[in-house]
Every structure is written in structure tokens, then in C-alpha cells.
Amino acid sequence: MNKQIIDGMAMKRALTRITYEIIEQNKGTENLILVGIKTRGEFIARRIASQMAKLEGATVPVFGLDITGYRDDLQDDQTATESKVAGQLPVDIDDQRIVLIDDVFFTGRTVRAAMDALMDQGRPQSISVAVLIDRGHREMPIRPDFVGKNVPTASQEKIKVNMTEVDDEDNVELIK
């Protein structure tokens, strides 16, 4: 059974709020890089960057990050090596403020893998985490800095984020 918990307008409002919070916490957009965890995290990062351009008149770099090679649930060494090479960011991240962006925050393992990937790229000044949905159930001592909506879930439930870029509509569903 699927239940829509966020519609397109609510998603837009949540991303707008996250955008303002990122700008405020970072005192602007200077030395800021948005890194979206592929796939939907990258789309969210692009939307946030677009809003930043409208609000601040600044172009904030946005990159997608494939963390497949950094996941702790993969056993295939060849896949891991290929993914690490494919996930390289085309910019120097040393002394930059990175905002790592994903659609759903669950156990913290995805964000940990993304941080490992970033640290292999360089030494950023800071890394903060922005997510559209935080559903709890931490397994790592990591929490998002910017959250669109907290959605407490049972561990067997799932959250499905639909975005127009891949799903032809914007909404978030709780799948029981």
C-alpha cells in the first residue's frame, strides 16, 4: 500500500527552505560546492543550485557522485574499482565547503560512503549533509544538517521519492 506523504508543492517548499538554510549557515555561496549522491540526490542538488542562482545571483557548482564503489554491502572488487574511478569530481575540493545532498536519509551508511569518496578526492573545509526526507533508524553516528521533512517509519516500510526528471512527477510516497 502506497500513501503519498508529500506532493509537488510541498517538495518545492521543502527544497526552498533547505536552500535558504544552506545559504544562511554558509553565510552566502562563496567556496560552496553541491554534491548530489546519484541519482535523485543529484537532481535535488541541481534544483537547490537553481534556486541559489535566483536568490543570490551566484552560480554554485553541482556534481553528481556515484558511491557504488564505497558501499560496504558490495563484494565485487572490480565494480568497486570501476566506480571509484567513475565517481571522480572534476574540481579541486580542497578548502571548499561541500554540501552533500541525498533524497532519503536512513541508516547513515550511504552518507558515510559518500564522505569516504569525498575524502579520497581531497580535504574540504567542511562537509554538511542535506536530505529531502529523514526517516530515522541510524546505524552510524551521522545526522543531516538540513532536512526537508522528518518522516518516522517502521524499518520494513520504504520511502519512494519521485522526481519529474526520472519519474514524470514530484512527490514522496510511504510504501508499507
Image (spheres, helix red, strand yellow):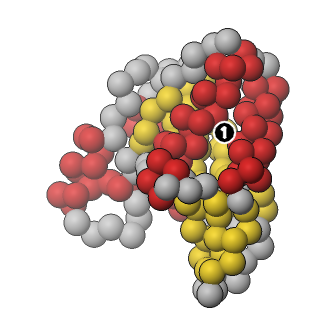
Q: Quadrant of the N terminus?
A: bottom right
Residue furthest to the left: 78
Looking at this view, is 22 or 162 the one in front?
162
Residue furthest to the front: 168
Q: Residue at x 35, y 56 (%)?
A: 68
Please rate how many residues cluster around mark 1, counting C-alpha atoms within 10 Å: few if below 14, some from 14 to 19, many from 20: some
Q: Residue at x 80, y 34 (%)?
A: 21
Q: Position of residue 49 (x, y in %)?
A: 60, 28
The disc labelled 1 sits on which kind of residue? Ser
Residue 96 visible in rendering: no
* Res 72 quadrant in image: bottom left
| Residue bearing mark 1 | 128
Q: Position of residue 89 (x, y in %)?
A: 38, 30
Dot 1 lies on which element? strand
Q: Position of residue 174 (x, y in %)?
A: 66, 75
* Res 64 quadrant in image: top left
Q: Residue at x 51, y 23 (%)?
A: 61
Q: Residue at x 67, y 12 (%)?
A: 57
Q: Quadrant of the C terminus?
A: bottom right
* Res 85 quadrant in image: top left
Looking at this view, is 171 or 39 the one in front?
171
Vertical arrangement, residue 34 with respect to residue 91, above or below: below
Residue 41 visible in rendering: yes
